[in-house]
Each structure stands twice: as structure tokens, then as C-alpha cells.
Image (cartoon, rainbow, N blue to C red):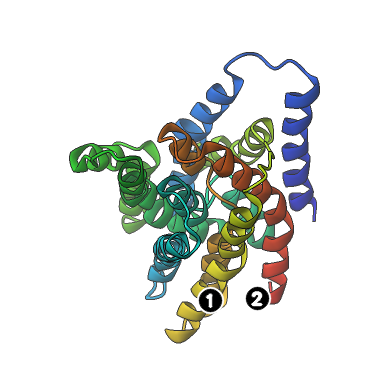
């Protein structure tokens, strides 16, 4: 309970500071730089060597693919039926196909399922959601904005991402028996800064602006991201006999709020930025209720 309270507190503090205080210019960029380049790699280095390799680990990764490509198929189909613009289809595919599996997923999974759940959340994020953002996400943004994807740039972005490099090092360290206790005592405290800072940053950026013709797109987008996507992931897991914490974390990561970076990508590609930011803000708010509720339904 105290861990969930920490999430709400950090998110609320960020929103209050953005609304009533005068935070320094560039504070969001600075916090995000630390989280992405220092705290996240440290957390990956601390947790990945402790992940128990088993035959079910493919599921949290596959669940992220189901969410993304399911969103693309759904919104491309709805776009034809409802006469949506290419920009709207691209925006909803990005923000409702990619989840906030790190900034919100890590602290929420740790709050609900401890370090073991957090380790599985790292697998879903680093092997599932992030590579999708850097590859299929960039391709979708380019396609719907009329640009040509650049495969070499996408590959370089994945291979040089600090957390991805840490993932490779962590896997090797785990295969060799893990880190010495002295290094464990360094990685984990640095990684622990991710939770409060990431949620504070989310609060600083929180926006919720509805346009007159966006309500139906908002409802359909969040209906997929917060309800149908995790249901599809659960059905996939049950069909292949996945159970226990692996099933729970895979489904909950599939149910996570839209990804901030996906909304930024939509904004940069001019894919209906107002809708993308509205879906992001509403999704973050609603996921604070729907993810814990989903955890209860899964027996957590």
C-alpha cells in the first residue's frame, strides 16, 4: 500500500509543481536524461542477472507485440470505416500500441509484485516495448507522416540505447553467476531513483485537453489500450499455458498507460498532437485505477 501511495504522491507532486510553482527551464529534460541514461541502466544491471531463465519468458515480450500490432490493425480498420485521417490512425497506433512500461510500469510492478515482478517488467520493456518503439514505432510515424523509414538509423538507435547495452551486460553477468555484492550495493540504490523521479516527471508533463471531435477516438483508443489489449495478452498466455507471475506481469504491462515517448514521436511527426497528448494524459490517470484493478482480477 505504501508503494502505491508513493506513486500517487510523486505524480501529484509533479502536477502541482507544474501548475503552481516555477520549476527551472529544462527540468523535465534533465530528469528524463538521468532516468533514461543512469537510473534505468543501473536498474537493468541490478535486476537482469537475477531473472530466472525459463521457457515462459517469451510471453511478456510477445504480449507487447500483440498490443502494438493489434492496435495498428484495429485503428487502420476503424480508420477506413469511420473516415479518419492518416494522422489520426498513426497517432492512435503509436500512443495506444506502445505502453509506458518503464516510467510507470517499473514502479507499479514493483509496488504490486516486488523485485521479482520488477525483473519481469524489465524483460517486457527492454526486449518488447522499447525495440518496438525504435523500430515499428518509428516506421509507423514515418509511414503516416509521409516520410521514408531509415533502417540503419533505427538499428543504431536500438543498439546504442544505454538500457539495451545494460541488458546485454546483465545477461552475461547472470550467466557468469551474478555481480559481486559490492557492485550490487551500487547498482540498486542508483536504480531506486527511477521510481520517484520518473513519476515526478510524468506529473510535470501531465496534460488533458479534449477537442470537440476527439471524444470517440479517445474512447476507442483507451478502450483498446486499457481493456482489450490486456485481454488479448491474457488470452494468448492462457492459450499457451502461461501462468503465475509471468502471466500476471505480461498482462499488466500490456494494460499500462500510453508511452510518453510515443506521444512525443507523434507530436514530432505531426500526427494529430492534441489527440496524442489527450490520450496520454487520460490514459495515465485511468491506468492508476485500471492496472491495480486488473491485478486483483488476475489474483494478485
Name the mark on residue 116. none
Residue 4 can be seen, yes or no = yes
Residue at image location 37% in from the left, 48% down from the top:
137
Work out which quarter of the rendered image holds the C terminus and state it. Answer: bottom right
Which residue is most to the front? 83
Instruction: Locate residue 23 relative to residue 242 in the image: left or right.
Output: right
| Residue 119 % position (x, y) | 51, 57
Residue 298's disc number: 2
Residue 207 against residue 73 in the figure, above or below: above
| The quarter of the displayed image where residue 152 is located | top left
**Which label's residue is closer to the chain start, 2 or 1?**
1
| Mark 2 neighbour density, 10 Å: few (under 14) some (14–19) many (20 or more) | some
Would residue 243 appear left or right of 20 to someone viewing this image?
left
Per the image, label 1 sits on a secondary structure element best described as helix
- Are dots 2 and 1 in contact, CB under 8 Å? yes
Q: Disc 2 and disc 1: Cα gap in Å?
A: 9 Å
Residue to which mark 1 is pinned: 234
- Residue 84: x, y in percent? 47, 54
Residue 169 in the image, given as x and y percentages of width and height = 32, 46
Q: Is residue 71 above or below residue 5?
A: below
The quarter in which the N terminus is drawn is bottom right
Which one is in front in this view, the residue at disc 2 or the one at disc 1? 1
> What residue do we see at 57% from left, 50% from top?
106
Res 18 quadrant in image: top right
Amino acid at each position: 500500500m505504501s508503494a502505491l501511495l508513493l506513486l500517487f504522491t510523486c505524480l501529484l507532486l509533479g502536477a502541482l509543481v507544474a501548475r503552481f510553482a516555477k520549476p527551472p527551464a529544462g527540468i523535465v529534460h534533465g530528469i528524463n536524461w538521468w532516468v533514461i541514461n543512469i537510473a534505468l541502466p543501473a536498474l537493468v544491471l541490478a535486476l537482469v542477472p537475477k531473472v530466472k531463465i525459463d521457457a515462459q519468458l517469451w510471453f511478456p515480450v510477445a504480449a507487447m507485440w500483440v498490443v502494438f500490432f493489434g492496435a495498428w490493425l484495429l485503428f487502420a480498420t476503424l480508420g477506413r470505416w469511420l473516415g479518419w485521417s492518416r494522422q489520426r490512425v498513426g497517432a492512435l497506433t503509436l500512443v495506444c500500441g506502445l505502453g509506458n512500461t518503464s516510467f510507470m510500469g517499473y514502479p507499479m510492478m514493483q509496488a504490486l509484485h516486488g523485485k521479482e515482478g520488477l525483473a519481469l517488467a524489465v524483460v517486457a520493456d527492454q526486449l518488447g516495448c522499447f525495440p518496438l518503439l525504435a523500430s515499428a514505432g518509428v516506421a509507423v510515424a514515418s509511414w503516416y507522416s509521409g516520410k521514408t523509414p531509415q533502417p540503419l538509423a533505427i538499428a543504431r538507435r536500438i543498439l546504442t540505447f544505454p538500457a539495451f547495452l545494460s541488458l546485454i551486460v546483465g545477461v552475461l553477468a547472470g550467466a557468469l553467476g551474478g555481480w559481486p555484492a559490492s557492485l550490487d550495493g551500487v547498482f540498486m540504490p542508483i536504480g531506486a531513483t527511477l521510481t520517484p523521479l520518473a513519476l515526478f516527471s510524468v506529473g510535470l508533463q501531465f496534460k488533458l485537453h479534449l477537442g470537440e471531435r476527439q471524444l470517440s477516438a479517445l474512447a476507442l483508443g483507451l478502450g483498446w489500450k486499457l481493456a482489450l489489449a490486456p485481454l488479448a495478452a491474457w488470452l494468448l498466455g492462457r492459450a499457451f499455458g502461461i501462468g503465475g507471475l509471468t502471466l500476471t506481469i505480461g498482462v499488466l504491462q500490456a494494460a499500462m498507460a500510453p508511452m510518453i515517448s510515443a506521444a512525443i514521436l507523434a507530436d514530432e511527426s505531426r500526427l494529430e498532437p492534441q489527440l496524442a497528448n489527450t490520450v496520454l494524459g487520460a490514459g495515465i490517470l485511468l491506468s492508476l485505477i485500471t492496472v491495480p484493478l486488473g491485478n486483483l482480477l488476475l489474483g494478485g
